[in-house]
């Protein structure tokens, strides 16, 4: 099983500032990495696939980078609606054995 | 607009059974892989199972094998999860999700399953 580790567990950032979230895989997943946003009481929402491709309707302030085992989600200028929990997910296996990171909570500083 | 609506959750005793349903609309259901993803209270996301477009292939997380069964009825635009021999650790919100190149691009609102005596 590929283990996904996210850091930090909690990130405190002021509105308007940049947030950088990290995700590490226990073995290479190439670029088969997605990011999701989950607000309290809601279902997750797909933000990024293929490590760096924004999903439909996702604002340009969200960007993803990385390949192999190290990945980053950057939110360039935090808006109030961006404070949420973020998860990474790898999908490199076949047959599918998808795994998620434990999440990073992005909170208002 | 693509939409997924789960139902069937509730309180069940350990060792009991439950069947979750997911009604799909707004997209061509029979052309997509579908999955169930769960989230225990206060915890992260865990992929549970996936099923191919025609139902001919299914895959499960190890903890679900032999107890949970994913199925779909393309004529009814519906996805199911039959849950048997339930354990306390199966307590979670269960989300139905559409797969798009192995990511989950459409999610339902979730249905809560509580396994407790």
Image: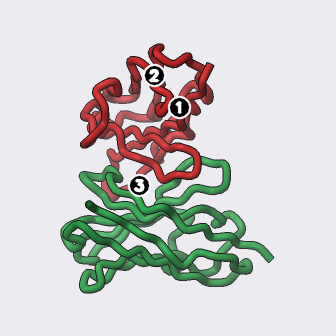
Chain colours: A red, B green
- Residue on which the image places disc 1: A83
Marks 2,1: beta carbons within 8 A: yes
Q: State which mark lies toward you, 3 or 2.
A: 2
Find numbered disc 1 in the image and state the secondary structure of the residue it sits on.
Answer: loop
As displayed, is residue A28 above or below residue B40? above
On the same chain: label 2 and label 1? yes
As displayed, is residue B65 above or below residue A88? below
Which residue lies at the image location 47% right of the left edge and 76% below the top edge? B81
| Residue A20 locus on image (x, y percent) | 46, 20
| Residue B32 locus on image (x, y percent) | 24, 65
- In the rendered structure, the answer to whether residue B1 lies left or right of residue B107 reads left
Q: CA distance from mark 2 to mark 1?
A: 8 Å
| Residue B5 locus on image (x, y percent) | 42, 70
Which residue lies at the image location 39% right of the left edge and 64% below the top edge? B35
Find numbered disc 2 in the image and state the secondary structure of the residue it sits on.
Answer: loop
Chain of the residue where label 2 is placed in the rendered structure: A
Which residue lies at the image location 53% right of the left edge and 31% below the top edge? A83
As displayed, is residue A11 above or below residue A95? above
């Amino acid at each position: 099983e590929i283990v996904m580790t996210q850091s930090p567990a909690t990130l405190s950032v002021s509105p308007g500032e940049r947030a950088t979230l990290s995700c590490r895989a226990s073995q290479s997943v190439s670029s088969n990495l997605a990011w999701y946003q989950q607000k309290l009481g809601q279902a997750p929402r797909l933000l990024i696939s293929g490590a760096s491709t924004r999903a439909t309707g996702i604002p340009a302030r969200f960007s993803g980078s990385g390949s192999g085992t190290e990945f980053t989600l950057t939110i360039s200028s935090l808006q109030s609606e961006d404070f949420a929990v973020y998860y990474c997910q790898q999908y490199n296996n076949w047959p599918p054995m998808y795994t998620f990171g434990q999440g990073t909570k992005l909170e208002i500083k | 607009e693509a939409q997924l609506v789960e139902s069937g959750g509730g309180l069940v005793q350990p060792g009991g059974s439950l069947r979750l349903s997911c009604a799909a609309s707004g997209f061509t259901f029979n052309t997509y892989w579908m999955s169930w993803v769960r989230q225990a209270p206060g915890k992260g996301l865990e992929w549970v199972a996936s099923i191919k477009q025609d139902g001919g292939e299914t895959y499960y997380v190890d903890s679900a094998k032999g107890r949970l069964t994913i199925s779909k009825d393309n004529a009814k635009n519906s996805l199911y999860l039959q849950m048997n021999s339930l354990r306390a650790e199966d307590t979670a919100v269960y989300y139905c999700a559409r797969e798009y190149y192995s990511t989950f691009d459409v999610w339902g609102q979730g249905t809560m399953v509580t396994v407790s005596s």
